Amino acid sequence: MNLVNVDLVKNSNIAMENKMKLKLAQVWSCQQAMPKLLGRELANTKASYWIGRNAKAIDAEYDILNTSRIKMVKQHGVEDNVTKQWNIPKEKIEEFTTEFNKLLETEIEVNITPISISDIPDAKLSPLDTVAIDFMLKE
């Protein structure tokens, strides 16, 4: 059972957890920024907690997405007998890319708690990182 101390949340700029609609493309693109954010020592302990919970929810969706991507690679690709790596032949790259991009347009619901930028001033994120995780940030 998920219990949230409403008084703790009310006393900060952190919103209560909610179901947020995301496209799988957002899940895919935030995988570069999340480790940077998770690796930072943040002064706001509550923000750190919610960032960790958000990361856990996003990672679960990313794992499912990546498993689907690997299946697509194996479907369209050829395994190298020496390296045991899968490669997509040039003539199948466009087909693979179209199929993967269609998958990335899929909309899902994820439990995300928006974090106020003012709660993480010490995060030191690049503009690209901020764009990648903007769905979980609020002003």
Image (spheres, helix red, strand yellow):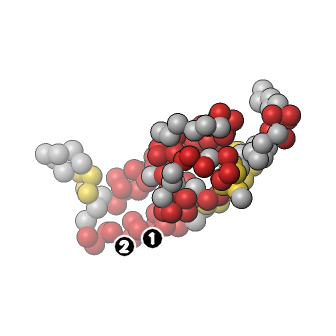
Q: Alpha-carbon distance for marks 1 and 2?
A: 6 Å
Tell me the residue that label 1 is attached to: 98
- Left or right: residue 66 versus residue 87 is right
Residue 25 visible in the shown view = no
Residue at coordinates 26% horizontally, 70% vertically from top-left?
90
| Identity, as a three-letter code, of the amino acid under mark 1 | Thr
Residue 102 picture location, percent across and down: 53, 67
Residue 79 picture location, percent across and down: 23, 51
Residue 37 picture location, percent across and down: 52, 45
Q: Quadrant of residue 60?
A: top right
Residue 2 visible in the shown view = yes
Residues packed near mark 1 inside 10 Å, few (<14), some (14 to 19) or many (20 plus): few
| Identity, as a three-letter code, of the amino acid under mark 2 | Glu
Label 1 sits on a secondary structure element that is helix
**Is 44 situated above or below 33?**
above
Q: Which quadrant is home to the C terminus?
A: bottom right
